[in-house]
Image: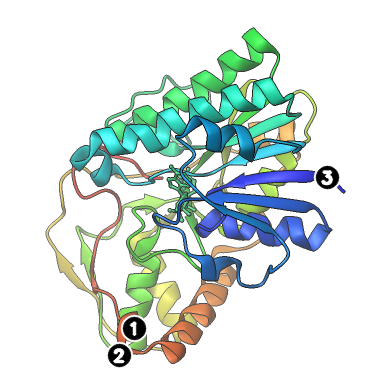
Amino acid sequence: MARYLVTGGAGFIGSHVVDALAARGDRVRVVDDLSTGRRENLAGHPDIEMVEADLAERQVAEKAVADVDRVIHLAAIPSVPRSVREPRRSHTANVEATHELLLAARDAGVGRVVLASSSSVYGESETLPKHEGLRPAPLSPYALHKLIGEQYAALFSRLYGLETVALRFFNVFGPRQSPQSQYSGVISLFTAALLAGRGATIHGDGEQTRDFTYVADVARGILQACDAPGASGRAVNIARGGRMSVNGLYAALQRVTGVSAAARHAEQRPGDVRHSQADVSLARDLLGFAPEVAVEEGLARTVDWQREQAAECPAGSAGDANVRIGPRRAGRSGG
Ligand SMILES: NC(=O)c1ccc[n+]([C@@H]2O[C@H](COP(=O)([O-])OP(=O)(O)OC[C@H]3O[C@@H](n4cnc5c(N)ncnc54)[C@H](O)[C@@H]3O)[C@@H](O)[C@H]2O)c1
């Protein structure tokens, strides 16, 4: 039975990682300041150790890594627009907390740190699919924070022998995702509109594409990265490796919800990458990663969850049907 620290474990992806670890019988400590995470996301795990604290504080990071074998670092403020609006606060959560955690993990002799990066590090490169050999070109503070985290991790591997793996997630979706998510919040907003019998608004022609990846696949990739030999010091894409257009997504959600409602198209908003798709061959070769959940199956699970939520909390669940995909302002991240 290994001991894991999951930072940001009360968040969307983190809580699915906790589910996967708990199912294997591993011991889990979560550190989360609940800035975007929710205690309810961990309601199924009364036995895990949950520490509500800010990882950017050195003592918090030092205590967090005590007696753990692996660190899964997901805590962040995962938002391009917020990083533009509040660059200092985002830098503290995304860069300083990561640095404190790497230092603490080095000093505590942690076996490996797996940390969340993002496809946003690729910027507006038009190459498809995006592979790890492309030169990063961050277009927002958030994307730069993620790149700095990756590079710090690789440097700690070289300089101090701390094993690290950075994972570049693309558009992760699934139950417990906030509708505010820049990545795939569009799914819960489309679903909310359809379940209310309304059509959603699609910005642009809807032919922009994303590599939508179901969260359980991402959680599995994270666990594989915790132990894969030969992966230390690397940055690796984690995604399905496919592309779905926003129109295709909307059509799939109409099938899954059983509600047919024409979408309205509004003008395209500036700043969106047109297409995003991951090359996942490195993940396959280095980590043995292969996605298992088809997008439509993942959508069905997500819609089921959203229906349950709406039944439990009808007033707060409707959301805003005026949606777009990607960040609201600077930066062109697809995930
Ligand atoms: N969701 C995606 O599609 C996607 C894509 C690319 C990268 N990522 C990255 O994956 C990670 C998880 O993202 P998510 O979608 O689950 O977001 P999330 O907002 O649900 O989870 C982030 C968690 O970190 C916590 N947190 C933030 N600052 C903290 C701090 N200073 N100390 C302790 N806890 C703190 C939040 O409360 C939250 O629970 C993030 O690092 C994000 O940048 C996500």
Q: Nearer the viewer, mark 3 or mark 1?
A: 3
Q: Name the residue tied to disc 1.
A: 194
Q: Is residue 30 above or below residue 295?
A: above
Q: Which mark is residue 132?
A: none
Earlier in the chain: of badge 3 and badge 2, it is 3
What amino acid is at disc 3?
Ala
The foreground one among 42 and 193 is 42
Q: Name the residue tied to disc 2.
A: 197
Q: Is residue 259 above or below residue 30?
A: below
Give the distance between the C-alpha atoms of the residues marked 2 and 1, in whole angstroms.
Answer: 5 Å
Task: Residue 2: give x, y in percent of width and height.
Answer: 83, 45
Task: Residue 106: give x, y in percent of width and height.
Answer: 66, 21
How packed is label 1: few (under 14 Cα within 10 Å), some, or many (20 or more)?
many
Say whether residue 44 is left or right of residue 174. right
Where is residue 108, by image quadrant? Answer: top right
At horizontal 80% and vertical 27% (from top left) the residue drawn is 229
Q: Report if the beta carbon of the residue with label 1 is closer than 8 angstroms to ligand 1.
A: no
At horizontal 21% and vertical 38% (from top left) the residue drawn is 84
Q: Name the residue tied to disc 3.
A: 2
- Give the colour scheme of this rendering: rainbow
Say whether residue 140 is left or right of residue 312. left
Looking at the image, which residue sits at the far right?
A: 1
What amino acid is at disc 1?
Leu
The foreground one among 113 and 34 is 34
Q: Is residue 148 above or below residue 130?
A: above
Give the distance between the C-alpha atoms of the residues marked 3 and 1, in whole angstroms.
Answer: 43 Å
What amino acid is at disc 2?
Gly
Where is residue 187, by image quadrant? Answer: bottom left
Task: Residue 175: give x, y in percent of width and height.
Answer: 52, 69
Q: Are marks 2 and 1 in contact (CB under 8 Å)?
A: yes
Say whether residue 299 is left or right of residue 29. left
